[in-house]
Image (cartoon, rainbow, N blue to C red):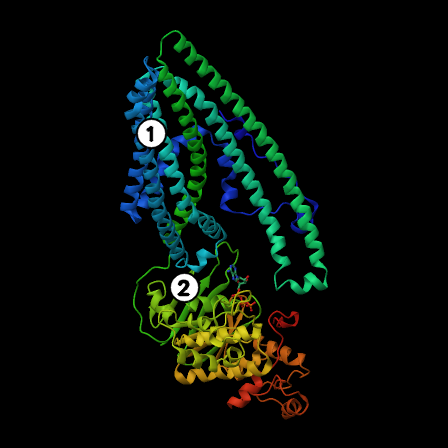
Amino acid sequence: MTPFARRPPRPIPVSESEVLLFGGALRHDKAFVNHERPLLRLSFWSMARQLPAMVATVTRAAWREDRPALLVLVGAELGQGLTRAFGLVAANRALTALFTAGPTTERLREALPALLAVTSVAAAAALLSAVSVAAAGQLEPKVERVCTARFYRGAVRVELAVLEDKDFHRLLDAGRFGTDSVRLMIGSSVTVVNAVVGLAASAGVLALLHPSLVPMLLLVAAPKGWGAVVTARRQYASRHAWIEHRRAISVITSTLTGLDTAAEIRVHGAGRMLVGAYDDMAATVEKEQQRLARAEAVTRTAASALSGTAALVVYGALWLLLASGGMPLAVAGTAVIAVRAAGASLTALVTQVNRLYEEAMYLSDLERACVEAERHAIPEGGTPMAPGVKEIRLEKVTFVYPGAPAPALSEVSLTVPPGKVVALVGANGSGKTTLSKLVAGLYLPTSGQLYWNGVEIRDADRDLLFDQVAVLSQDFPRWPMTARANIHIGRPGTPPDQDRIERAAAESGATGVVDSLPHQWDSLVVKGFERGTQISGGQWQRLGSARARYRRAPLLIVDEPTSALDPKAEAEAFQSLRSLTDGGTTVLLITHRLAATATADLIYVLDNGRVVGEGTHEELMAVDGGLYRSMYELQAAQYGFGAPQAASAGQAPASARTEASASAPASTPAPASTPAPASAHASAHAASDPAPRKSSPHAQPAQT
Ligand SMILES: Nc1ncnc2c1ncn2[C@@H]1O[C@H](COP(=O)(O)OP(=O)(O)OP(=O)(O)O)[C@@H](O)[C@H]1O
């Protein structure tokens, strides 16, 4: 039935620019791509067979959300079908009266009631159509909102380890496309029901008038249906070809106006190259669109020719029946009206069934995503634990990322005591961040136990656990909202408390940042909107830090909290972290600034996922050839301070101390072997060590 549609889509030529920039065609791994081929292979009949199930899916969703609106909608659609049947009967009556013998005025008078009935039925149909539009308008956004909210509510509860799995992520991506589909499917279902009822009404009335009219109706309608299937399928293929290219092009064009690319776009001349690439890729699309348009024109012409031929055959048959007296003229006239109406219904039916099928695929993705998200959700409830941090203990904890060949953490046993600054140090990739995420309850150990105040994390009520934790991660979010909202979102369960917000800002050095904004707390820290402004990386870090403090959680996990701060701000930040413990807060600090870890109460040294050292700075510095000591010395050496001669528990040579204070600039660190500063001032001074940033190639600490 659909020879054109069964042909696989023609590969779109890949432009030179695509090869240059993407190494070939840029194909997104998204739901619509996954579904493209199966959809194009489907026959009309297999789609028709699935029609009831598809309509049932959307009906169930609508039934759940707004029964009255659904009932009104269905009633209005069925009513319209009935008006069509009554309309045909009335038209037949009118034609019968008009075609009888007798004076014209007499015939007109005879036909008048039927003509009035035709008009009334048309008015009723218009009214019912309006009711249907209103009911669908009420239902569609509601169903869309509920389905979308269910999807996102599920997505935000998914276990982090599952969320990071690329297959699961693809499922979520695919599900997102389905949120529009529910709404679109209601519209399509309404049209499909309307068309089916309309066709049934036409066929029913024609069967009553003359049995031969039903096959005639089918004969005229069939080519139209065929044409509609092929046209719809081709439009679908065209749309998808265009989407692929448009997305690839948008990858290029979005960089042309972006602020983060602006410098290289101009200075390196990347802009000229990319605009050229746009032109090249758009020309490929243009050719493809022209090819599709030509093919579509041919198909439409063929469909129209077939339809016209079928109509000729039918009208010829009607003529023969009329001529032989086998059919009254009024019945033939009614048949012509019915055939025309049925043709329109059939075209709408085929187009919308196609659409419905496409959307149903996205909806099934949404349904699957919701079900899987619920299956992998962080469980609600569990063993309640005492509030605050009494003790966090890891016993032989191993953690393997899903699909990773080796564990990120191996048999880690350690304790985080309450009210202390506990530092995690180690080379890049040694497992510090992973460990902190386990402590925060974001990951569950693959093996081993993690106890939070005596409750094993797998049994613990994790919502209660999360309540005890504040996180300032390395890649903390930069919420595109106001400065106030950026801090308040740290504890979003209660309304914003301006005093507390300002205190958190003051503690994090963010007060000056907010004061300098054009609308202070109401400034949007995202450019391109009214009241919007752009802030620097360091200013963002202060806002992020204020957010973590506003949360006022017993455990604060900070991962490279000062990577973007200037030396003075960095020193203040570490000092302020230290002072948090006075209020009982436990701080888990991850940093490569070893001058700052020197003041920690306890340091754990990680190497390749294992704890290879623990103790205070002094204790670790006393370990000859220890990893901590070698990293510390390497950092200090980069600032011109030689390796210490003696490393006995912080007993640095007096000359080293003198050298540091005599020759170093104001923000230069104490030398590597300087004892951990006892005073807050000294701590701040040590912390101001402009040690290489994590991203710096010099930041690779020595491996022992
Ligand atoms: N989401 C993830 N999925 C898979 N592997 C990961 C993921 N995050 C980290 N890893 C891997 O786990 C190991 C430990 O990474 P982790 O981020 O914990 O190290 P880190 O000590 O914090 O490093 P850095 O100092 O660079 O921040 C690394 O081998 C890393 O590649």
In the orientation shown, which residue stands out farthest toward the top? 324
* Residue under the image location 70 percent in, 45 percent down: 16
Position of residue 638 measured from the top left corner of the image (x, y, whole percent): 67, 79
Position of residue 386 measured from the top left corner of the image (x, y, whole percent): 31, 73
Tag 1: amino acid: Arg
Contact, mark 1 vs mark 2 (Cβ under 8 Å) = no
Labels 1, 2: front one = 1
Tag 2: amino acid: Gly
Whichever of labels 1 and 2 marks the residue nearer the N terminus, that label is: 1
Tell me, yes or no, if residue 376 can be seen here. Answer: no
Element under disc 1: helix
Is 247 placed above or below 42 here? below
Is 241 placed above or below 416 here? above
Q: Where on the picture, by quarter, is residue 218?
A: top left
Element under disc 2: strand
Labelled disc at residue 448? 2
**Residue on which the image places disc 1:** 84
* Residue under the image location 72 percent in, 62 percent down: 268
